[in-house]
Each structure stands twice: as structure tokens, then as C-alpha cells.
Image (cartoon, rainbow, N blue to C red):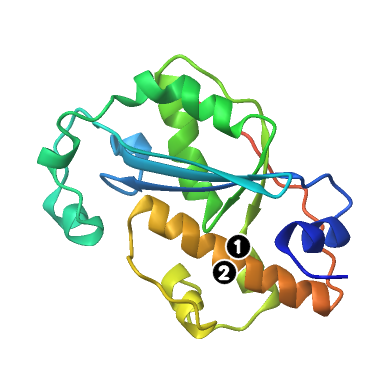
Amino acid sequence: MKYNIETSLHQSSTQSLDNLVFLDIETTGLNPSNGAKIIEIAMLKILNGKQQQYQTLVNPEILIPGECSRIHHIYDNMVKTAPYFRHIAKDVISFLSGSIVVCHNASFDLLFVHKELHDAGYFLKDIYYIDTLHIARRYFSFKSNKLCSIAKTLGINVKQNHRAMADVLTTLAVANCLFKDMYEREIKLIFQNSYQYTPNK
């Protein structure tokens, strides 16, 4: 059987995996409980072998700290006319609903997304996810488990670091390599991860 990411996951899991969304965000800080906000979101859906992308900058309604801009190269003037998260919340829910989300360090991305949705008056029901960071730590022995480091170790060309869609595409490429290796080693990808958001966490 020819390998592809969906075939591997179907063979490695007891759950239906025909609707995957790779997700990444950029933010003004590390903790939404301290007021950090999303300033960019990107998603790539794989459904029945076809890909669909969604990406946008987001106006956080606060200033972006200089130390954050130096990492992701997103500055205040770039998000000045971008939509507020509350104005894209329905699009985000529509894109994610019914999908299994794939992230690198999923707890970070999903906490921010759920917090922003909650603040906008929306609630996304418990969602299943696959965390490539967890997989890398559990089944592999990379010197560093940072996304870009894993990608370089695997020979994946990383064109741009710390921009949401670029990181989504890198996560997709990394996941493809990790899942293929696990498939060949007959490692079962058994996951029961359902993210549950608790307001005011």
C-alpha cells in the first residue's frame, strides 16, 4: 500500500481521521490569562485528500511587545487594519468543527484559540487533537524538539520561522515524516486527547 499521511493515520488509529486541520498561531505573549492575544492564525485542512487553507492577521487591540515582534516579525502597523478575532470567530469555528486538530505544542495553540473564542462569545466543544511535540518526545530522540530543529534534522526545508502558515506547512511536513516512521515501525497512534477549555484558567 502506498504511503500517505491519511493512509498512515487510518492504519495507526482506531478513530476516523479523514478530516485533519493543522493549526498554528502567533501571539503577543505566552499566556492569554495575562492578556496575551492572537495576532495571526493559520489553518490547513486535509479532507478526502484535498487541502484547504485559511490564514489571517488579527488586530489584538493592544500593542505588540517589541520582543515578540523580533521573533515573528509582525508589527503594529501590519495588524492595524486586520480583523478583530471576534469578527473571524465564526470562520474559525466553521473550519475547526468536526476535525482533528494537529499542532506542535497543542496546549499552547488550543488554549489561545479557545480563550479568544470564549471572549468573543463562542464555545468550541471538546475537540480531539494530535500533538506532534508529544509524539516527538515519546517516540523519537531528537536533540531538540523545537519544530524548526526537528524539521532540519529530518531534512525539511524551513523557509520561514514563526509565521503561522509557514509553521503550519512545517508541522504538516514533520507530521508526515513522524507518522510514516511510526507506520513503518507498526507503532499504533492511539490518542484520547480531547482538549477541554476552562474559562478563567
Q: Which residue is mark 1?
A: 132
Q: Which residue is mark 2?
A: 174
Residue 121 image offset from top left, x and y in percent: 45, 14
- Vertical side of 34 occupied by 94: above or below: above
Determine whether, in the image, residue 63 is placed left or right of residue 125: left
Disc 1 from disc 2: Cα separation: 8 Å
Q: Residue at x 14, y 46 (%)?
A: 75
Which quadrant, please, contains the N terminus? bottom right
Determine whether, in the image, residue 154 is placed left or right of residue 78: right
Amino acid type at image mark 2? Val
Determine whether, in the image, residue 171 is placed left or right of residue 192: left
Would you say the residues marked 1 and 2 are in contact, meaning their CB atoms lie under 8 Å apart?
yes
Q: Residue at x 36, y 35 (%)?
A: 33
Q: Nearer the viewer, residue 66 or 93?
A: 93
Residue 66 image offset from top left, x and y in percent: 12, 52
The label on residue 45 is none
Residue 155 image offset from top left, x and y in percent: 50, 83
Q: Circle 2 — which element?
A: helix
